[in-house]
Image (spheres, rainbow, N blue to C red):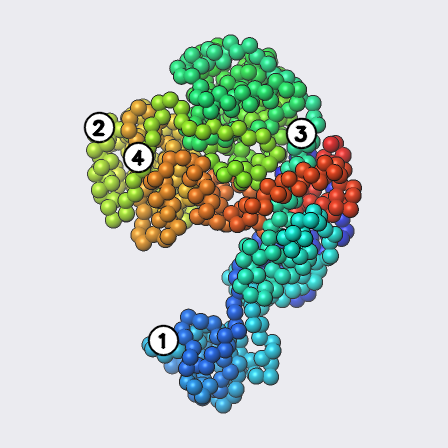
């Protein structure tokens, strides 16, 4: 959700207090259960539990005779206990034979579940419900979900919702807690445009929550169900309203017109050696219009891998310098900041400008000189990391901030950087192609410029897929390319969430490749010191090392034109967007370039299509659309790489058609009720509180 300038906290309406109470305030939820529910729901408030929607249902309506029952199905049976066999050893189960006249099956109770054998005395009639399995040709029901006497059969839930749980949290504990949470949910006034509610036949907010948590069938938990769609729209509408308020507040602030004579740009372009592509020129023209306008710019520059965004950003920065001001570029990692410094520094030097570098590693006199140059105005351009936020970093007249890979920074950090100057224009860059509709979820408060195509000299990359069984062939082919003078990246697999495990895999691969190519392999990983990373990269860039083995935790955002091969192990574990980003490390020079995707068999259908898509296309925007289709919800486009926000209720794939209506509705509401004081406006304020977008509420009065 969008966050804007720091301000006095907004008081939450008392109507919502029950939703923001702790889970421990619910009846029957003690400290142990509260901790488990908090872990499962991703938060410790009643609202977090309400947002934790079921992912499926167990349908217990099937009541076949045992003779007609099949393994793999959940069934409910009324049976008589005909035999009981105690465990023969500690590892063996209780085996309790039951029948219904048409046939018989065995109930198996292992370990801690053995105490339930007392519920099944010989000769008793019971209603049992659970999953049937086949054991040595005989039907069995291991650990029935329910064992009830016939007179209590009405207690059996015929359609049972399935929530995501955590270890030792039992389904019935989740069900009781959710029911208690639903009882706390207040009736809230309607914030959605009434015509849309009628047209879509959506229930009210509270009725939608109840319908999702008490599904009548499997369709009730599907993304397309009206109740689920309603809640998804609520979240998207809240986000778009917060972004619209943020945008309006920004537009209301005074800006400054930055107009230059083009002399510095001309020198930099001469040094670059190529004219701008039509797409670059169009993007720069849009940026120039914003810079020249007497209002603050907030624009996203989106381009595929290698489309030439950095050059466009530099030319925008030079416009600020031509206007007598300063400009800064902030990158998320030290490696990327140093790469930008090298690229921008060369072209800026041709224009007679020095570029300061500020990262966590600049110390002593070098740092003091950089700070003094920026504070006095002698140094007009700077490149850095989070170190730019530090209090001692001061600019004489900062007018433009360029932020690379914005999603690695929070919006508040963007504002902190902008606060270093007067009416600072902000240009954000991302290299991850994102479908147009989804741009609204991440950057709805920004104008968007897109650079398509590739600049002169960039060659397409041939992408091949090989099973891991043919790894020896891949190494042999790599040897032939190295012998011809090529350099290669070798990206090691995502072993797990453990950086140590990734590192171990990389070290093992580097050692193996070093036996094939002695003295020519360098290793780069996240635990290395900065100087060690620089040394490894420098050796690779100079050609002293011709193979760079890297873990996935390292931002391989490096520019070595001589690198023409990249091998990606366990490619099936990566998202399409990330694979495409990695592939963009090669194809930057004059040589033919290759990307080899090494995968483990068997491949899932989604992984197979993902790899086929990458082999068939190098259009990042087409790849992003396909990635959206393949991934669906969860990790659409790899949120960590793409910068898409995470949602509790909306699925950007299934609910993408709701994003634009939510944005249009938010804009329309603010046009009709700028202060959100009408009945629907006041309801919308509740919605902003509900989704914790209170930070945007103080901006209402400033519009």
Mark closer to the observer (4, 2): 4
The reply to whether residue 165 is visible in this rendering is no
Give the crowd class for mark 1: few <14, some 14-19, many >=20 residues within 10 Å: few
Q: Quadrant of the C terminus?
A: top right
Asked if residue 63 is positioned above or below residue 311 in the image, the reply reads: below
In the picture of the structure, the residue carrying the numbered disc 2 is: 484
Q: Quadrant of the N terminus?
A: top right
The reply to whether residue 79 is visible in this rendering is yes
Taking 551 as reference, is 370 left or right? right
Q: Position of residue 451 (x, y in %)?
A: 47, 28
Taking 180 as reference, is 583 left or right? left
Disc 4 from disc 2: Cα separation: 17 Å
Query: Regarding mark 2 in the picture, which secondary structure is present there?
Result: loop
Earlier-in-chain disc, 1 versus 2? 1
Q: Position of residue 156 (x, y in %)?
A: 57, 75
Give the crowd class for mark 3: few <14, some 14-19, many >=20 residues within 10 Å: many
Disc 4 from disc 3: Cα separation: 45 Å
Closest to the observer, 117 or 435: 435
Q: Answer yes or no: do the residues labelled 4 and 3 have beta carbons within 8 Å?
A: no
In the picture of the structure, the residue carrying the numbered disc 4 is: 462
Give the crowd class for mark 4: few <14, some 14-19, many >=20 residues within 10 Å: some
In the picture of the structure, the residue carrying the numbered disc 3 is: 250
Please identify the quarter of the rendering in which residue 618 is found.
top left
Q: Position of residue 46 (x, y in %)?
A: 66, 56
In the picture of the structure, the residue carrying the numbered disc 1 is: 135
Taking 528 as reference, is 424 left or right? right
Earlier-in-chain disc, 1 versus 3? 1
Residue at image coords 46%, 11%: 267
Query: Regarding mark 1 in the picture, which secondary structure is present there?
Result: strand
Q: Position of residue 42 (x, y in %)?
A: 58, 53
């Amino acid at each position: 959700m969008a966050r804007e300038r720091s301000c006095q906290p907004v008081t939450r309406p008392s109507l919502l207090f029950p939703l923001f109470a702790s889970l421990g305030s619910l009846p029957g939820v003690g400290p142990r259960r509260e901790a488990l529910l908090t872990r499962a729901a991703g938060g410790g408030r009643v609202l977090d539990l309400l947002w934790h929607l079921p992912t499926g249902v167990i349908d217990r309506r099937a009541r076949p005779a045992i003779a007609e029952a099949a393994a793999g199905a959940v069934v409910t049976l009324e049976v008589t206990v005909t035999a009981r066999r105690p465990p023969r050893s500690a590892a063996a189960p209780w085996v309790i034979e039951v029948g219904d006249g048409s046939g018989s099956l065995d109930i198996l109770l292992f370990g801690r579940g053995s105490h339930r054998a007392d519920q099944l005395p010989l000769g008793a009639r019971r209603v049992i419900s659970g999953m049937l399995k086949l054991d040595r040709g005989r039907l069995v029901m291991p650990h029935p979900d329910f064992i009830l006497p016939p007179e209590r059969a009405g207690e059996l839930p015929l359609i049972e919702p399935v929530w995501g749980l955590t270890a030792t949290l039992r389904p019935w504990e989740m069900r009781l807690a959710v029911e208690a949470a639903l009882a706390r949910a207040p009736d809230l006034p309607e914030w959605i445009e009434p015509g849309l509610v009628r047209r879509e036949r959506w229930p009210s907010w509270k009725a939608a929550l109840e319908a999702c948590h008490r599904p009548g069938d499997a369709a009730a938990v599907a993304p397309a169900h009206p109740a689920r769609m309603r809640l998804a729209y609520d979240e998207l509408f809240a986000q778009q309203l917060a972004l619209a308020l943020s945008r309006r507040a920004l537009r209301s602030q005074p800006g400054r017109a930055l107009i230059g004579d083009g002399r510095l740009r001309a020198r930099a372009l001469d040094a670059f050696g190529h004219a701008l592509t039509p797409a670059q020129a169009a993007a720069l023209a849009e940026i120039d219009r914003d810079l020249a306008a007497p209002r603050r710019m907030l624009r996203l520059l989106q381009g595929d891998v290698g489309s030439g965004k950095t050059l466009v950003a530099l030319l925008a920065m030079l416009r600020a310098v031509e206007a007598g001001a300063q400009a800064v570029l902030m990158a998320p990692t030290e490696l990327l900041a140093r790469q930008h410094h090298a690229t921008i520094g060369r072209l800026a030097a041709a224009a007679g400008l020095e570029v300061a570098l500020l990262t966590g590693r600049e110390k002593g006199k070098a740092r003091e000189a950089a700070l003094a140059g920026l504070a006095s105005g002698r140094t007009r351009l700077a490149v850095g990391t989070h170190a730019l936020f530090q209090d001692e970093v001061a600019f004489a007249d900062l007018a433009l901030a360029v932020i690379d890979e914005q999603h690695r920074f929070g919006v508040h950090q963007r504002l902190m950087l902008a606060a270093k100057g007067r009416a600072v224009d902000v240009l954000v860059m991302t290299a991850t192609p994102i479908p147009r509709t989804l741009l609204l979820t991440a950057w709805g408060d920004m104008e968007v410029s897109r650079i398509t195509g590739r600049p002169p000299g960039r060659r397409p990359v041939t992408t091949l897929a090989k099973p891991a069984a043919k790894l020896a062939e891949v190494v042999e082919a790599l040897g032939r390319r190295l012998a011809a003078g090529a350099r290669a990246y070798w990206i090691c697999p995502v072993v797990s969430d453990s950086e140590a495990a990734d590192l171990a895999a990389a070290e093992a691969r580097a050692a193996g490749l070093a036996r094939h190519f002695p003295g020519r392999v360098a290793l780069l990983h996240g635990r290395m010191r900065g100087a060690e990373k620089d040394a490894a990269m420098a050796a690779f860039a100079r050609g002293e090392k011709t193979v760079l083995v890297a873990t996935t935790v390292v931002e391989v955002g490096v520019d070595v034109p001589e690198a023409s091969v990249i091998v990606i192990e366990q490619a099936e574990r990566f998202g399409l967007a990330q694979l495409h980003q990695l592939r963009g490390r090669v194809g930057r020079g004059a040589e033919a370039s290759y990307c080899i995707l090494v995968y483990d068999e068997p491949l899932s259908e989604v992984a197979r299509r993902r790899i086929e898509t990458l082999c068939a296309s190098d259009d990042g925007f087409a790849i992003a659309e396909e990635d959206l289709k393949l991934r669906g919800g969860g990790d659409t486009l790899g949120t960590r790489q793409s910068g898409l926000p995470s949602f509790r209720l909306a699925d950007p794939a299934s609910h993408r058609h709701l994003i634009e209506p939510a944005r249009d509705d938010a804009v329309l509401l603010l046009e009709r009720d700028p202060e959100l004081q009408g009945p629907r406006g006041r309801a919308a304020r509740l919605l902003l509180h509900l989704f914790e977008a209170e930070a945007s509420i103080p901006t209402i009065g400033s519009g």
